[in-house]
Every structure is written in C-alpha cells, then in structure tokens.
Amino acid sequence: MDTAALEQLLDDVFDQAVVHHGYTAYMRDYEVVIYATADPRTGVEPACLRYLFRYCVEARCETSVPAEVWRTSLDDRLIDDVSAGGLDGYVWGVKWHCLYPGAKLLPASERTRRWSRSLGLDFHEVLIETNAHRLTLLFSDLQVSELPIGYTPFVAD
C-alpha cells in the first residue's frame, strides 16, 4: 500500500470516535471501527467506518489512562454511563474513545522489514492513540469501508 495514501486515510479520521477495535472473528485482520461526524452546519452525514488492517501480524494495546485516574475508575458503575452519574473517575461506559492525538504511520523498522522479507509483501506499522488506549499494529494493507450506523462486530459463539 502506498504510504502517502495510508497516511491520508489515517489523517481523515483524526479526532473522531473509536467505538470498537480488535481482531476480526477469523483472527487474521484487525479492525478499528470509527464513528465519524462533522459540524451539522456542513451537511455532512455521520458515518460508521471500518478500518481493516489486513494481515495484522502484531497488535499491541496498552492504556493511556494514567494510574492515578485508573485508581479512581475501578468502580463497576463506571462501565455504564447511566450508573456512573456523579461518580469521580473515567467513565468507561460512554463506549467510545476520542481518536486523539490520532493515528500515524511509523518509520520502517526491523520488524516491518523482517515481515516484508518473510511474506513478500510490504508491511507497515501504525500507532493509534486515543484518550484511553495506545494501539500499535503491524500489518500489510488497509481497507476502509462504510458500515451501517450502530454496527456491532460479529462475536463468535
């Protein structure tokens, strides 16, 4: 995949809402589902976008919520935005994270070069930062598609 095109796709969703991320049900590709909105005055309708990181050989997820905030965010009532009312702490129950500071393509690394040599495909590494998670994905291709608003990823039985 062309790096300029990849960077543009990542820039297109800066500061939007990540509503889901994880490996697909078939466990090869990694999806990030984004609810994208614009100022209502623009007339641009909201969209639910699936960023499918194909051939994802590595996915790392770590918290970006500081330990002192975690300490005040352990109450299970915070996993539901209704029961969280009036409580101190991070409200996990809003069910989305702000894609800020955003997503960026990282420079080629020994890992991307090794996978490229091994599979005969170009590999890339991307850092996706939200207000609650920091994802690092190592993948070969990115496909973006529009999903129905309210999309829920398939969960295997």
Image (cartoon, rainbow, N blue to C red):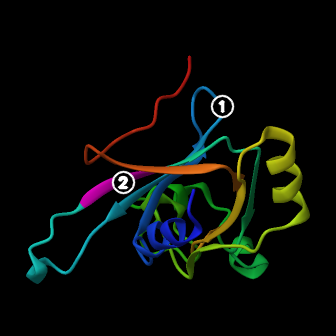
Assign a secondary structure to mark 1: loop
- SS under mark 2: strand
Q: Residue at x 36, y 54 (%)?
A: 49
In this orientation, which residue lies closer to the viewer: 25 or 113? 113
Give me the C-alpha separation between circle 1 and circle 2.
19 Å
Quadrant of residue 131 within the rendered picture: bottom right
Spot occupied by residue 29 in the image (x, y as percentages of width and height): 61, 39
- Give the image location of residue 60, x and y in percent: 76, 56
Q: Quadrant of the C terminus?
A: top right
Amino acid under label 2?
Leu
**Could one spot residue 123 in this view of the protein?**
yes
50 part of magenta stretch: yes
Residue 136 in view? no
Residue 127 found in image quarter: bottom right
Q: Which residue is mark 2?
A: 49
Q: Is residue 32 left or right of residue 39?
A: right
Report the span colored magenta: 47-51
Question: Toward the viewer: 132 or 99?
Answer: 99
Quadrant of the image containing the N terminus: bottom right
Is residue 87 one of those drawn in magenta? Answer: no
Q: Position of residue 43 (x, y in %)?
A: 8, 74
**Horizontal side, residue 46 vs residue 57: left or right:** left
Within 10 Å of disc 1 (Cα), the crowding (few <14, some 14-19, many 20+) is few
Label placed on residue 27: 1
Q: Are marks 1 and 2 in contact (CB under 8 Å)?
A: no
Residue at image position (85%, 67%) is 109
Dominant secondary structure of the residues highlighted in magenta in the image:
strand
* 132 on left or right of 67: left
The residue type indicated by label 1 comes to Met
